[in-house]
Amino acid sequence: MSGTDESAGSGLPEATILRNQLARSSVTAESIAHSALDRIRLRDPLIQAWRHLAPVDVLEAARQLDRAVRRGLLHGIPIGIKDNILTRDMPTRYGSAAYEDFSPGLDAACVRLLREAGALILGKTHTVEFASTGLPPPTRNPANSSHTPGGSSSGSAAAVADGHVPLALGTQTGGSIIRPASFCGVWAVKPSWNLVSLEGVKPFAPSLDTLGWFGRSADYLLVLYETLVPDFVQAPTPDLKGARIGICRTPLWPLASACVAGALARTEALLVQAGASVSDINLPSDFANLSAAHLAIMRSEGRTAFLADLRLSPDQLSPGIRRYAEADWIQGSAEVLKAHDLAARCRAGFDDIAARFDVILTPSSTGEAPMGLSATGDLAFNGLWTLLQVPCVNIPGHAGKSGLPVGITATGPRRSDAVTLAMAKAVGALFHT
Amino acid sequence: MSGTDESAGSGLPEATILRNQLARSSVTAESIAHSALDRIRLRDPLIQAWRHLAPVDVLEAARQLDRAVRRGLLHGIPIGIKDNILTRDMPTRYGSAAYEDFSPGLDAACVRLLREAGALILGKTHTVEFASTGLPPPTRNPANSSHTPGGSSSGSAAAVADGHVPLALGTQTGGSIIRPASFCGVWAVKPSWNLVSLEGVKPFAPSLDTLGWFGRSADYLLVLYETLVPDFVQAPTPDLKGARIGICRTPLWPLASACVAGALARTEALLVQAGASVSDINLPSDFANLSAAHLAIMRSEGRTAFLADLRLSPDQLSPGIRRYAEADWIQGSAEVLKAHDLAARCRAGFDDIAARFDVILTPSSTGEAPMGLSATGDLAFNGLWTLLQVPCVNIPGHAGKSGLPVGITATGPRRSDAVTLAMAKAVGALFHT
């Protein structure tokens, strides 16, 4: 669990070194588990990242891993699982009072793949109710505990940011991975749509729902790509000198606070200094309708997803979820179909635009994490990328006027995940030199 | 369980009468269960529709329903569940040797909604492995037991066709509902994409996967729409006199056997006789590429869906599934993205075409069910409609030269399910007068 700092001077790419370290670590899973549990014992009474954590079970699972002959790529690495993802040996509560005693003994496909790679499933992290817009969790932002960590993957973002675990799974339908990553100052990725199976993840809006993850570094993000995506091939380390960088402020730019403008300006200056070719991207006019299209699709598909919960346990749903599941604000099929058709046209159009660049940089959030825990922030700068089904990597490294983290997003064409992640890592390295 | 025959002369629409009968039936759930079990005991040693059926448990569940104060819409109606759909009190084996002992104690969302409506979950019906292209099930066609019933929803189609149950759930990713319905001669529907939650259904290709159902009559299909789809509103009974009917032979017409041509010609003649305005629809030329696009998307998404199974239990997968899960025949992301973009353009284009008609009729299969059980038939006439995400209703009522059933499909624009079902019922009534 040493991160990437031991790799200097070896001549191998850092991610390869990390992979080798993980798979051949002589450190026991049990000792790694102890240090994670110690950190959590110290910090989680304040941060409240964890919805379920059973230290005795965790240590027993770690000892079982140490007894196993085969050491997978993630041997003994503790991973947090957002509590909308099924785990066979832990409750899965969806952030909902209706699922207080829900423990169906089934692993989501992603959890099966993590276990197969030797990961230690440490516990379940807090989520907004149904990973949607219902009841917010009690989780606090590690950078300032009177601020929200963002949501809906609140616990996973905070757990990685606060050093509890080096990796945690999240999901994004609007901005549920990239926004909390921006607010907490951690690396995170929302992959291209449908690269990772959602079997065993509670559905919200299938056209948008995407499994992703938070990591201590860009290399940790890469290792989970290799674990969860068929045939994922790492992209070569890029040279920023001569790289074609697009800056996309999006039609939502008026919503960006001064610190976001500052983060992008600082990034642009560093890139120019590094010899990159930086230019602005102005999206075609119909992209301005994508935010409304995203909301129409999310609401429409959310109604389908939450119907059984509405019918079976209406009194245990929060008003936020009930609004999704009930009819009064749904504008009808024709609008939803127009939204799907617009999204499809813009997906193809954005791929064409993005093909002219090595990476595109854009805001991860409207600004710093808001004060208070009653709301998890605005998804404005995330929803359109989720709808476009493109990869998004949050690059941490900036701060706002309150000193809280602010991230920027690296994106690119659909399924350009390998290149986008490699470029994001190279850009992120500029912020720490 | 009297079907619709008692409704004559009451002045109410048949579906309303059926709904009232179901909800207010004085017949006990236990007596209905006994008659279903009797029929199954007699027939299933030959037909083999059921993968799991525990009569003692079924009768106990029926008695529990009879003790319940509230009587839902489907009170006591026995329903078969395709074995790729989770049920909390029965094993779910996915037609796969890898899941022989799989019983995770969790209901799919659709099963929860059925139970809430008072349905009696009778048992699990045989499916092709992973509802995909792997190992075929032992199920036989009730019309001629030396022929396949079609697949992958083989058991559900056969169970309804053979009078075991009036309703059974299936799923379609290629042609897994409509083709077996055609081969077995039963009513069935593949709704518009994402009208029904797939939570708890094993994923295959999320852009295509659709939950649907087989029913004793069009009215039974309607009752499940009302149970499973938010805010579903029955369409008025249409008048065929003056109705605008499109006949779409599709670019795959050379694959249609003579009996399919005959079925469409007979349908056309009956419609003209009923005063309908019938015309041919020639799809634009890019629709000819939809079948290839469907395959590219299904294969690509199938790789993601089956990755955990491939990694964890490769030796328990059949060669057919392994081909999906392994890399050698996948043509790469660019082709898959082009397939998605073509599909999206054709969806909008087909809605425009279909808006000029009250219903569109098209083949349900290339012909009668093939001899033998080693293959479940060709999905040629189903895949393009699944990719277009439009509703498809199989209308039974024709036969081929071997005397086996042949159906035709009613379809229409995306989310025109209510009108398409009402038109299908009206067209189907012509075949029995």
Image (tube, coloured by chain):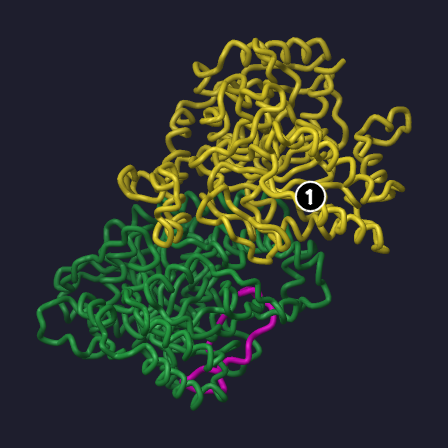
Chain colours: A green, B yellow
Asked if residue A132 is among those painted magenta in the image, a careful observer would answer yes
Give the vertical position of A274 relative to B32 (above or below): below
Which range is magenta?
Answer: A130-151
Question: What's the amino acid at mark 1?
Answer: Leu
Give the vertical position of B304 relative to A318 (above or below): above
Identify the residue position indicated by label 1 in the image: B122
Residue at position x 63%, y 46% in the image? A332
Between B173 and A254, the residue placed more toward the observer is B173
Residue at position x 55%, y 11% in the image? B259
Please state the horizontal and vertical placement of residue A419, each as a whole percent of the image. 24, 57
A58 vs B51, left or right, is left
B153 vs B380, left or right, is right
The tally of labels here is 1
| Residue A259 can be seen, yes or no | no
| Chain at numbered mark 1 | B
Q: Quadrant of the rendered structure where residue A98 is?
A: bottom right
Quadrant of the snapshot with the C terminus of chain B: top right
